[in-house]
Image (cartoon, rainbow, N blue to C red):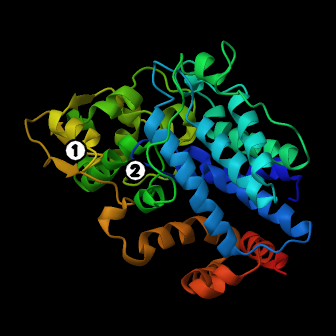
Amino acid sequence: LRLDPVRAAFATTQLVRWLDFSDTTFWGSHPSDNLGALIAAGLLRERRGTPATVGDLLRWLLQAYEIHGALVEANRFDSAEHGLDNVLCAKIASAVVAAVILGGGRRAVLSALSHAWIDGQSMPAYRHAPNTGPRKAWAAADAAARGLWFAQLACDGEPGCPTALSADPWGFAVQGLRGGMPRIARALGEGIVADSTILKLVPGQRNGTTAIEAAIGLHEAVAPRLGEVAEVRVYTHDEAIRRIDKTGVLPNPESRDHCLQYMVSAALVYGRIANWHYSDEAARHPALEPLRAKVRVVEVAEYSRGHHDPRLRSCANAVEVRFADGGATPRVERLFPAGDPRQGDAGGALLAQKFAALAAPRLGDAHVAALQALFADAPRLRAMPLGAFIDLSICPAAAR
């Protein structure tokens, strides 16, 4: 579909973000939430006569990653103290970088930024029962689209709000942070966020991805004996307990992909996790709910320390299954998810497999292979006009 830029930013970001299958950082949130807004802004720039390439898009994306990640790390907007959702950071980063893409000078960038701060910010109530629903998958799209909208307004001459942060009592510092000012974790431009971004190779909330991987490793031993399971022990860290240790009714996919017990149980039953495994159909497997009721979550102090240690930033989980006859599986431990850069996915082989698995049913094997050949040719890819690349990535018939 060809949509106006703001709606295009919403739609593309929603596709990127759906069911937590994009990327994440050690501190939470998803920097690729900005991608839809930057693509839309770049295409609008091209339409207005200023060339844009894939290399430009990558540079803009790195800028957005740094802004987004530095804000998330330093402020913990989603803590109980502040009660704000981290998609705020996508709104800020998208507004700033989109204003630059559209040719805005310092005044326009500051105007877009001020409107992004002063805008009503999302609250994370929709991430928790009984409010969990599809909004969890489109909240970031809304934020990125709003950021682009503010950038367009600013570049068309909309004046800014010079005390959006500091106004007393109505500014963001007072109303959003109870008197504190938002901070950034470090000087921007060091590349730390992009270099440390975790690419998700299984869908689900970040703190549970290693538990999924451990459970998948136990599938062959457990699946034939599901009726004999007495207890499933998940050894985890405190952040996972805070965010995804959930019991009770899970009414939709958005509640299941943020439930540690469901994620582990589904991995044990099915032996893999894709988006479908959070569906109503998958959840109706007769063994799944009885198994979820037997999951016991145990905090391991060492895992919690490792998660919060800035030198380590682990995401550790271990899974062990005990049977009614007294036997048990080995305790399978994963310290870092497969998509963590420290796992050494040389050349992005696992990411390429993920892309092929998701894109081939839509584009066909031959077109996916052509795209992967393009991805492997960095100079050619960077020099390609952005519009031509987007058309090529959508479907063969749309290629220019």
Residue 304 point in image, percent of width and height? 23, 36
The quadrant of the picture occupied by the N terminus is bottom right
- The number of numbered badges drawn on the structure is 2
Percent across and percent down for residue 260 are 37, 35
Name the residue tied to disc 1.
Answer: 318
- Relative vertical location of residue 355 with respect to residue 66 in this rendering, above or below: below
Residue 103 at least partly seen = yes
Residue 154: x %, y % from top left? 84, 44
Residue nearest the observer in this picture, 249 or 196: 196
Q: Residue at x 86, y 61 (%)?
A: 44
Which of the two discs, 1 and 2, sits closer to the camera? 1
Q: Position of residue 184 (x, y in %)?
A: 49, 41
Report helix, strand or loop for mark 2: helix
**Quadrant (top left, top right, bottom left, bottom right) of the C terminus:** bottom right
Amino acid at dot 2: Tyr
Determine whether, in the image, residue 345 is placed left or right of residue 60.
Answer: left
CA distance for labels 1 and 2: 18 Å
Q: Amino acid at mark 1?
A: Ala
- Mark seen at residue 359: none
353 shown above or below 81: below
The residue lying at 66 percent from left, 27 percent from top is: 121
User: For the point 78% across and 63% down, which residue is it?
Assistant: 42
Res. 270 mark: 2
Question: Reading the chain from its start, which is encountered first: label 1 or label 2?
Answer: 2
Q: Secondary structure at mark 1?
A: strand
Contact flag, marks 1 and 2 (Cβ < 8 Å): no
Q: Residue at x 36, y 59 (%)?
A: 340
Q: Nearer the viewer, residue 384 or 105?
A: 105
